[in-house]
Image (tube, rainbow, N blue to C red):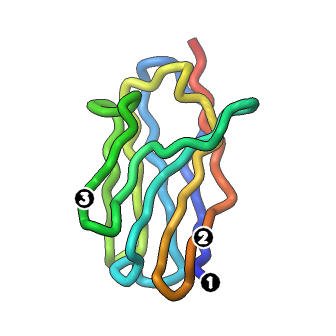
Amino acid sequence: QVHLVESGGGLVQAGGSLRLSCAASISIFSINAMGWYRQAPGKQRELVAAFTTGGSINYADSVKGRFTISRDNAKNTVYLQMNSLKPEDTAVYYCNSYHALLGSNWGQGTQVTVSS
C-alpha cells in the first residue's frame, strides 16, 4: 500500500501561517488523487483541499483564498500552505491518497492548533 507521512503541524497564533507536508512512499505521479482532510474532536472528518482524479483542485469553502495545495513530484510530496489561520482551523490534518490498484490510504495525521 501507499505509506503517507504528514509533518509541519504545530501551534500558531490566529493570522499566522503553517505549511504541511505529506511524503508518499511511491511516485505521486502514479497516484490518481491526493488531498488533505481534517478532523476536530466531536466533528466528522472533512475535505480541506485535494487534487482530484479528473486533474482539478477542490477546496472547502471555509479555506478558499487562505489555503493552497501543491505538489513536488520529484520529492513525492504534497503540501498544504495555510495562511490567515483561524481558531476554527484547529484539527488533526490527514493526508489521503487514492490509487486504482493500491486503494485509499491515510497518513497518521499532524496536529494544527490555532490560538486566539
Mark sitting earlier along the chain (1/3): 1
Residue behind mark 2 = 105
Q: Quadrant of the N terminus?
A: bottom right
**Mark 1 in CB contact with mark 2 (< 8 angstroms):** yes
- Disc number at residue 81? none
Task: Indicate the secondary structure of the residue bearing disc 2.
Answer: strand
Task: Indicate the secondary structure of the residue bearing disc 3.
Answer: loop
- 59 or 26, which lies in front? 59
User: For the view shown, which residue lies furthest in the right direction?
Assistant: 42
Residue 5's quadrant in the figure?
Answer: bottom right
In front: label 1 or label 3:
3
What residue type is disc 2 on? Asn
- 108 or 62, which lies in front? 62
What residue type is disc 1 on? Gln
Give the percent coordinates (x, y) of residue 96.
53, 62
How would you rate the neighbour count of disc 3 (Cα within 10 Å): few for under 14, some for 14-19, many for 20 or more?
few
How would you rate the neighbour count of disc 1 (Cα within 10 Å): few for under 14, some for 14-19, many for 20 or more?
few
